[in-house]
Structures are given as structure tokens and as C-alpha cells.
Amino acid sequence: MATAFSSSGGTGSSLARAAVIVAGVSSLVATLLSLVSIWLQTKNYRKPLLQRYVVRILLMVPIYAVSSWTSIISLKASLWLAPIRDVYEAFTIYTFFQLLINFLGGERAVIIMMHGRPPVQHAWPLNHFLSKVDISDPHTFLAVKRGILQYTWLKPVLAIVSIIMKATDTYKEGYLGLSSGYLWTGILYNISVTISLYSLALFWVCLHNDLAPFRPVPKFLCVKLIIFASYWQGFFLSILQWLGALPNGTGDYTPDNLAAAIQDSLICFEMPIFAIAHWHGFSWHDYADPTVSAARLPVKYALRDAFGAKDLIEDTKMTLRGENYEYRLFDSGDHIIAHEESDSRVRRVMHGMRYERGGKAKYWIPKPGEVNSRTPLLAGSGESGRTRRTSALDRYRSHSETEEATLDEDDEKLFGQARELEFGDFNVSHLSILKLLSRAE
């Protein structure tokens, strides 16, 4: 770093005083707008499964605003706040993904909802060597989820590595030479965030019609553009510095320090715009009841719920292990089968699903070591009813120990009436099966 960046100064130590003041006011305005929005969300905290994620996303603007302005006035304080900002950026992507999931009723509801729909093509040029995406396949859904969350897991590691490199003077922020830690962490960051945002966009494309009532486009743009402001414009400034487009010897600045000062100032100036965008994109009016002034849950308990970390920890464990994403746990239970273009049709068969009656019914064969544990589907309205009736139907189809059926006068009369109806023979065959099932039970 240049001598202008002393331990007591910041990236704005040589900026005009007016620029530092305007950046501070912008940060203050953005922070106040966001805090008011958060307070209104917690005051109308009627849907915790949705609003906890909204509150977490809204906190993103104050963290960016405070961190950037702190960097302008004090690098020593920024050394501690910048990693928090970086980690929270990654956490926001996870939070937005979970918000979309909960809009649609949870992961299982999303996977079942997609069952039978055509897979979605990748964007060019990935569509030429990657198969289509079908998130009705639990394993594919898990891969998309991991693609989104890998950035959430990698960013804290990069933040710690950056702190170590800054302490050893090997980070060289804004410099793109081979000896710069900024370059190599930037490459890893670019790859990770690109995969994460692409996976998130792919998920949104698969479900954009279902998410339409929840206005996902402005929400997605709010999250994506603030990430752009936090890194990509800084990376662009570094390229300008590397190309020599930034002047040398401007005041007490070297070109790389000037790039950092411009970056921090731009973020401060942009944050009020993002605060207003978040206010409208994640509006508290979506959850407010005009007939009641506040929700039943007190604000302090709403804040406790919104900023609890237990759900993140448990979901991370489940995603890393991937053991709860079996095909048997994510089946629709109706007559819908996987789309003909989907690879999951064969995968489900390999994992034990069997179809019958031309795909109008299906069932799971037992796993090795599971005796009499066949999981029935489509045999009745209730779970216990499906089990009993399918078990009886198995005995009927097996031709083992089947007794000759005898019909009484009431049965004959019922069948005679059925034959007089439209599709009479079809009705008679179903009546026969139902009679046999009732006797078998």
C-alpha cells in the first residue's frame, strides 16, 4: 500500500472533503431507509418462513454502506468489516434462493411440482455439451442447490485468506500482477460467483411461471446488481489500472490505491439507490394486513427469528451430505411420470420404481433387506388405504391361493345396472376388482 494509506487513514484520505462527506451522507441515508424497511417487516411479521429471508436480504444494504464508508475513513476498521461484508454477500445469495423455495412451499413441493414437465436447456454454449436440466429429479435439484451454495461456503475461506495476505503484504489490492493475491483470489471468486449466479438463474428459469405471482424479477435484480456493484466494478477498475488508464501520481495516490478509493466511493453513492430498490422489491406491504396495525409476534421475537442461524446450519449439513434426496422421498404419488426427455425416468427405475397399466399406476419395489415393505402409489386416497388395497391387489395378481369368486343376487343386480351405463363393460370390470379387494381385506 502507498504511504498515504496509513493505519489511521483510509482509501479516501486524499479525496476531496466534499466527496467524503457526500459518501458518508449517502451511506447514512441508505442505512436508515433499510433499517426502517426492516422494522416494518418485523412489525408485520406474519409469514416467518418468508420474512426471515426478506429481513436478511434487506440487511445487505446497510452492511455494504457502512463497510464502504468505513474503508474510506479508516483502513484499520475496514480490515474487520470488509470480511463481514464479503461473507454476507455470499449468504445473501443463499438467502434469496431459500426465499424462492419457500414462496413455492418448500423443496419437496418444488420437486413434485416439476414432475412431468419438460427439462430446460442450458444457455449457449453450455447447451452443446450439457444435458437438459430437470429439477424434478432430486439429484439434479441437489446439484443446482450445491452450485448456488458453493459460493456461500467458499467466500468465508477467501475472506480469511485475504486477511492473512493483507497482513503479510501479499494481497496488493487493485494490482493484477502474478505476485498479487488479489488476482488469484479474484479468479477463484469469479469462477465461484459465476457458477452460483448461473445456477440461481437456471433455477429461476425452470420456475419463472410459478414464481410470477411473487414478482421475482425485481428481487433477482436487486440481489444480482448489488453483487455487481460490490465486485465487478472494482474488478473493472483494476483492469483500467492494469491497462494504465488510471493516472499515475494523482495527489498521494498510486493507480491501485486510486482504484480502491473510487470503488469505495461508488458503492457509497449507489447504496441509496439500492435501498430504494429493496424497499419496493421486498415490500412490507406484501405481508401487511390493512385492518391490523401490527402482527401478533413482537418485534424483538421477529428479529430473533430472522437472524437465527440454526436453519442455515441444518440446511448446510443436509445439502453437503445429500442423503435425504432419495427418489422415494420426492415422488408425486399420482399418475404423472417423468417427461420423456428427462433422464430421471430411467434413474427412478434403477432406484426401484415400477410402472403398470401404461403408466397409470406405479409403485416402489422393496430395498434389499426390506421384507414386505413395498411402497405403493396410486391405489387409493389415503396412505393406509393405498397400502391395504395394493397389498390385496398384489395377492389378486399373483394367482397364488386365489379362491374362485362367487356372486350373489345383489352382485348380479349391481353388475346388470353397470352394463346399462355408458362404457358398461369398463364399469363392470372395475366393480369386479373392487368386490375382490373388499373380500381380500
Image: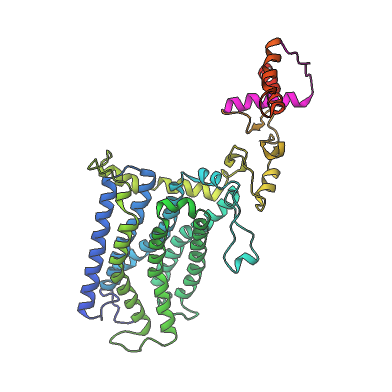
- Is 105 on the left-hand or right-hand side of 332? left
- Is 163 on the left-hand or right-hand side of 405? left
Q: Residue at x 58, y 25 (%)?
A: 384
Where 319 falls versus 388 (above or below)?
below
Residue 161 image position (x, y, % from top left):
44, 66
Q: Residue at x 62, y 38 (%)?
A: 335
Q: Quadrant of residue 243?
A: bottom left
Residue 159 image position (x, y, % from top left):
42, 64
Where 15 falls versus 354 (above or below)?
below
Colouring convention used in this rendered image of the protein: rainbow
| Residue 401 counted in the magenta span | yes
Of residues 12 and 167, the one nearer the viewer is 12
Q: Is residue 199 visible?
A: yes
Of residues 150 and 407, the one nearer the viewer is 407
Part of the protein shown in magenta: 382-408
Q: Quadrant of residue 301?
A: top left
- Is 8 on the left-hand or right-hand side of 119? left
Residue 75 image position (x, y, % from top left):
30, 71
Where 118 falls versus 305 (above or below)?
below
Q: Is residue 1 visible?
A: no
Q: Quadrant of residue 364?
A: top right
Where 32 falls versus 362 (above or below)?
below
| Residue 141 counted in the magenta span | no
Q: Residue at x 23, y 64 (%)?
A: 29
Q: How many marks?
A: 0
